[in-house]
Amino acid sequence: MSDEVRVDDVVRLRKPHPCGSTDWVVVRIGADIGLRCLGCGRRVLIPRPVFRKRLKAVVGRHGPSAAPAPSTDASAD
């Protein structure tokens, strides 16, 4: 289990959400961890120590993987 989670990581928590889903997307990192349920879309903030206790696994990344960043080159007209 990795201690470091990043925004857009999909994590699995030990207890299921009331909607039945156990998978969440990390939407905010700070003193609190912001999560969005993949089952119903509910957003919650969990204090970091509580999050570490409840974390079961980091499942993967959410969204397009390794998408190239848009070019900021002004000479490409």
Image: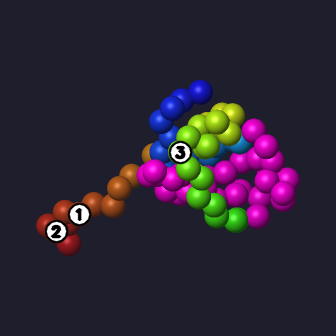
Relative placement, left or right, of 42 versus 48 is right
Q: In the image, what residue occupies the spot 68% across and 39% down?
A: 54
- Residue situated in front as seen by the camera: 33 or 22: 33
In 3D space, how far apart are the residues under numbered discs 1 and 2 (Cα atoms)?
Answer: 6 Å
Q: What amino acid is at disc 1?
A: Thr
Report helix, strand or loop for mark 3: helix
Q: In the image, what residue occupies the spot 16% across and 68% down?
A: 74
Q: Is residue 67 visible?
A: no
Q: What amino acid is at disc 2?
A: Ala
The image quadrant that residue 45 belongs to is: bottom right
Per the image, the residue denoted by label 2 is 74
- Residue 44 location (% of width, % of height): 63, 61
Furthest-left residue in view? 75
Report helix, strand or loop for mark 1: loop
The image quadrant that residue 58 belongs to is: top right
Q: Residues within 10 Å of mark 3 (few under 14, many from 20)?
A: some
Residue 63 against residue 48 in the figure, above or below:
below
Colour pattern of the rendering: rainbow
Q: Earlier in the sequence, mark 3 or mark 2?
A: 3
Tell me if label 1 and label 2 are in contact, CB under 8 Å.
yes
- Residue 56 location (% of width, % of height): 69, 34
Q: Is residue 47 visible?
A: yes
In 3D space, how far apart are the residues under numbered discs 3 and 2 (Cα atoms)?
Answer: 42 Å
Per the image, the residue denoted by label 1 is 72
Q: Quadrant of the N terminus?
A: top right
Q: Is residue 23 magenta?
A: yes
Which segment did they paint magenta? Answer: 14-40
- Residue 49 location (% of width, % of height): 56, 41
Q: What amino acid is at disc 3?
A: Arg
> For residue 48, which numbered disc appears in the image?
3
